[in-house]
């Protein structure tokens, strides 16, 4: 499937705090686990996962302080995942006209990813050692989301 | 003997003067750890026997060995130059004739130019005030020591001065040479020894007379000489064998001592080794489970990442589709005239809707051209339709994805539960390990040491069996020789009777009969003594173990092998009895020895026990204390306080403290505690509870 092109969304922004606390710890390219063991082999994976978490829990959160160089390119996100993100953005905006302004879709994805990461950090804060066993944390979040 | 008071002055942890008074019946002294309980016990030992227990060296030491350390450190600290500090213990008691006795022992140290000058021995003073005449008799030095030895035999000291914390030493008391020594003092065997000696001497003299008379008949003489020689040889053989037997018993006892120590060491190490091994197994299991978990997680990573993206957002997808349908219904999503289609018509110069030609600049061509729109939503609408198509297909798959996620989570949860269980198991075992961890550090432990110790214990065990066999064989040899001796003696008697030495023969026979009877009387008295001890010990042992539902057996005092042990209903020895029963057996046996002493000689020893129940717990402990209180005419029980001093509830509910409060037999009770802010200035103080 061809990439979904959203103009002006070549890069997706992330919060500086989450760059330090989430991306750096969980993504192999930034010194997290080895790629083969990592649940999020690339930063794009983490962004997608956290955005979906944000959409499911309806918890967008505007980025407080943007990380200076946006590290995630829209093109690096798999087309399948791009499609899900756009679908969720449209559902969240409850308006298809938003398709005319891709910037809004991009903002929506950024904010929900940020909200999703906040949620993940709250769980991790309860037990800092969970960084070593992120699967359990994710599992816990999944369980909770399912119940909710 | 009845103790009235003890006054302790500057002795070990006691600073200044402290008094305790006693009556008939029990006196309870309680105290937390390190409050001077054992030092109080030492005060009794020191004043009577010039001995105090050195905890660090684990042995009894005399004043000469203790030196200046016997004198309270704070008292020394406060001493001025030229001053004398004296450690002193005074014991007042009433003896069996109701005479009032005061025994005092002191040890002086003098401070001279900042240095201490120390005597090499303690000084003793004993005053006995006659109950009838009121006259006082004073004894000092050796005279006082000798007098005290008569009143309190050294060999019995460990019986009425009972130390519960050193169980191994206690056990050796009951089954080794010390037991025989104690019996010797208890039975006053020396009286019998003297009788036996006289009887044997008389017999020997009669024999000499008879031999002299018979020597006149040369032929008879030759025969008798031969028999005499044989009798002498047999006697020598009996002596030799008896010496071998004594040596064997000594070696067996020594072997048993080492075996008991090694077995104790081994049991701690074995438990330690077993626990280490178990922890290793748990760790291996945990490793395996973690690997399984890791494999599962790695293998199913897509489940918790990609698939969840879809399954988790199922509701959002449904909402999207609803929105899509609503918009479609409201015609908000028109069927697009796609720009490619328009471009195709313009290229082909033909309307592909009405299938008519549309040449360039014709009205139809221009109409088609007007539809070209740079802002057309073609792409967006196509995207929207693609997404809706994808959403549709996702919803169809989501059911199976959900099942997959649920199965995965169940499998992970099961593994997590198992890992948690193992980790709890490991923690529990590590805690146990800390508790069994004896003096040896974990780093000291290795399997070689364990194997070597096991081999040593096995060898000692084999030696022990060998000694028993040899002892039994030697005893049977002695019996055979003694039978031969009887035969030879009777052969000699027959020859003598046939001779003319009628008077000498009669005298010889009479002396033989006297000697035999003295021996028999002694043996039967001794056996009676042992039987009495055994009966009494059984009575006390049963009383102490009656609350325990498990059967504990009967006490056997085996004089042949100098051992006290328990037997089953059929008289078979019970091995490996538990620690609580061992202690109960000890107390019962000691109580029996003292009780028999009371009834035989009318000598009542007070029973002073330091932590007598330290190896017992729960019901056994309280029951043992009650038994001690019941058994002895006077008992002074020094025991650890189980209640927490500053916790009102704890002191209120403590069983021992309740006994002290409610038992009318207890007339005196004390609590020991420590005072002083610095370690150097800490010393024992006594509070009267009752």
Image: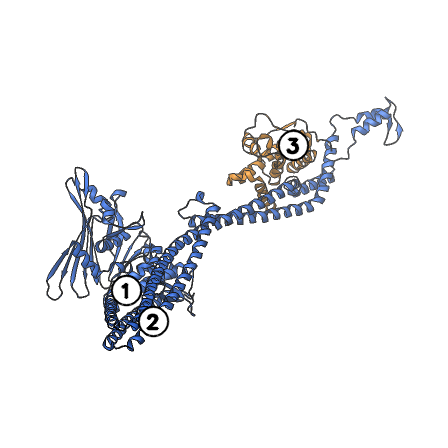
For the point 21% across and 59% down, which residue is it?
A: B149
Quarter holding the N terminus of chain B is bottom left
Determine the CA span between mark 2 and mark 1: 43 Å
Chain B appears in which tint? blue
**Viewer-nearest of discs 2 and 1:** 2
Q: Position of residue B80 (x, y in %)?
A: 16, 40
User: Which chain is painted in orange?
Assistant: A
- Choose the circle earlier in sequence order: 2 or 1: 2
Secondary structure category for the residue under label 3: helix
Q: Contact, CB < 8 Å: mark 3 with mark 1?
A: no
Q: Is residue B217 above or below residue B300?
A: below
Residue A68 in view in this figure: yes
> Which quadrant is home to the C terminus of chain B?
bottom left
- Please report the residue visible at 57 percent of the width from the left and 39 percent of the height from the top: A134
Which residue is nearer to you in this view: B147 or A100? Answer: B147
**Residue placed under numbered mark 3 in the picture:** A105
Look at the image and tell me whether residue A108 can be seen. Answer: no
* Label 1 sits on residue: B594
Residue occupied by mark 2: B488
Query: Badge 3 local density, few (<14 within 10 Å), some, or many (20+)?
Result: many
Q: CA distance from mark 2 to mark 3?
A: 126 Å
- Tag 1 subunit: B
């Amino acid at each position: 499937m061809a990439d979904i092109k959203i103009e002006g969304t070549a890069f997706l922004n992330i919060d500086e705090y989450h760059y330090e606390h989430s991306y750096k710890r969980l993504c192999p390219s930034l010194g997290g686990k080895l790629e083969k063991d990592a649940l999020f082999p690339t930063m794009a994976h983490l962004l997608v996962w956290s955005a979906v978490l944000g959409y499911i829990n309806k918890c967008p959160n505007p980025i407080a302080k943007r990380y200076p160089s946006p590290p995630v390119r829209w093109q690096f996100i798999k087309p399948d995942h791009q499609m899900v993100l756009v679908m969720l953005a449209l559902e969240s905006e409850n308006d298809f006209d938003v398709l005319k302004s891709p910037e809004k879709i991009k903002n929506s994805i950024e904010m929900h990813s940020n909200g999703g990461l906040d949620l993940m950090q709250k769980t991790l804060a309860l037990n800092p050692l969970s960084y070593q066993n992120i699967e359990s944390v994710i599992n816990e979040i999944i369980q909770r989301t399912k119940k909710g | 003997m009845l103790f009235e008071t003890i006054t302790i002055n500057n002795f070990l942890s006691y600073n200044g003067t402290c008094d305790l008074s006693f009556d008939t019946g029990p006196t309870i002294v309680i105290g937390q750890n390190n409050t001077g309980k054992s030092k109080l016990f030492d005060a009794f030992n020191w004043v009577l026997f010039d001995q105090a227990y050195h905890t660090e060296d684990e042995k009894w030491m005399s004043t000469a060995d203790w030196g200046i350390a016997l004198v309270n450190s704070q008292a020394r600290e406060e001493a001025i130059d030229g001053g004398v500090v004296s450690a002193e213990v005074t014991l007042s008691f009433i003896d069996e004739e109701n005479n009032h006795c005061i025994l005092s022992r002191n040890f002086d140290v003098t401070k001279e130019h900042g240095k201490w000058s120390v005597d090499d021995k303690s000084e003793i003073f004993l005053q006995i005030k006659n109950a009838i005449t009121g006259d006082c008799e004073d004894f000092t030095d050796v005279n006082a020591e000798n007098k005290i030895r008569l009143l309190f035999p050294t060999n019995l000291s460990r019986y009425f001065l009972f130390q519960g914390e050193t169980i191994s030493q206690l056990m050796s008391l009951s089954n080794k040479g010390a037991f025989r020594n104690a019996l010797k003092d208890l039975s006053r065997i020396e009286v019998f020894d003297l009788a036996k000696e006289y009887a044997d001497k008389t017999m020997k003299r009669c024999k000499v007379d008879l031999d002299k008379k018979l020597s006149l008949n040369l032929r008879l003489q030759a025969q008798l000489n031969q028999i005499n020689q044989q009798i002498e040889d047999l006697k020598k053989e009996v002596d030799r064998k008896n010496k071998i037997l004594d040596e064997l018993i000594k070696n067996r006892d020594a072997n048993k001592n080492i075996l008991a120590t090694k077995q104790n060491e081994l049991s701690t190490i074995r438990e330690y080794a077993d626990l280490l091994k178990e922890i290793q197994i748990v760790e291996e299991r945990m490793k395996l489970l973690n690997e399984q978990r890791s494999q599962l997680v790695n293998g199913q990573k897509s489940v918790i990442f990609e698939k969840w993206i879809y399954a988790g957002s199922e509701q959002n997808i449904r909402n999207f589709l609803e929105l899509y349908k609503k918009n479609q219904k409201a015609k908000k999503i028109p069927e697009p005239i796609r720009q490619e289609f328009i471009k195709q018509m313009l290229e082909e110069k033909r309307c592909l809707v009405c299938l008519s030609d549309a040449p360039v600049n014709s009205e139809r061509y221009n109409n088609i051209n007007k539809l070209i729109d740079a802002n057309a939503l073609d792409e967006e609408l196509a995207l929207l339709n693609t997404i809706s198509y994808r959403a549709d297909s996702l919803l169809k798959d989501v059911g199976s994805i959900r099942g997959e996620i649920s199965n995965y989570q169940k499998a992970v949860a099961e593994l997590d539960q198992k890992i948690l269980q193992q980790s709890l198991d490991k923690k529990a075992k590590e805690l146990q390990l800390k508790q069994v961890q004896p003096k040896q550090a974990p780093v000291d432990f290795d399997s070689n040491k364990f194997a070597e110790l096991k081999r040593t214990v096995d060898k000692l065990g084999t030696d022990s069996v060998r000694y028993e066999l040899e002892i039994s064989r030697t005893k049977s040899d002695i019996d055979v020789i003694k039978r031969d001796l009887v035969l030879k003696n009777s052969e000699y008697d027959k020859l003598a009777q046939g001779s003319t030495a009628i008077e000498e023969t009669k005298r010889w026979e009479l002396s033989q009969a006297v000697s035999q009877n003295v021996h028999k009387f002694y043996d039967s008295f001794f056996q009676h003594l042992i039987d009495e001890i055994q009966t009494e010990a059984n009575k006390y042992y049963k009383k102490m173990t009656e609350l325990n539902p498990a059967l504990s057996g009967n006490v056997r005092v085996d004089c042949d092998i100098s051992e006290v042990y328990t037997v089953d209903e059929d008289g078979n020895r019970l091995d490996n009895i538990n620690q609580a029963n061992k202690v109960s057996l000890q107390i019962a046996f000691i109580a029996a020895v003292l009780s028999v002493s009371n009834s035989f000689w009318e000598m009542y020893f007070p029973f002073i026990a330091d932590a007598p129940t330290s190896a017992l717990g729960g019901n056994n402990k309280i029951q043992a204390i009650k038994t001690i209180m019941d058994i002895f005419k006077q008992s002074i029980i020094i025991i650890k306080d189980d209640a927490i001093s500053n916790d009102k509830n704890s002191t209120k509910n403590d069983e021992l403290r309740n006994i002290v409060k409610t038992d009318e037999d207890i007339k005196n009770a004390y609590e020991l505690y420590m005072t002083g802010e610095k370690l150097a200035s800490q010393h024992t103080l006594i509070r009267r509870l009752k």
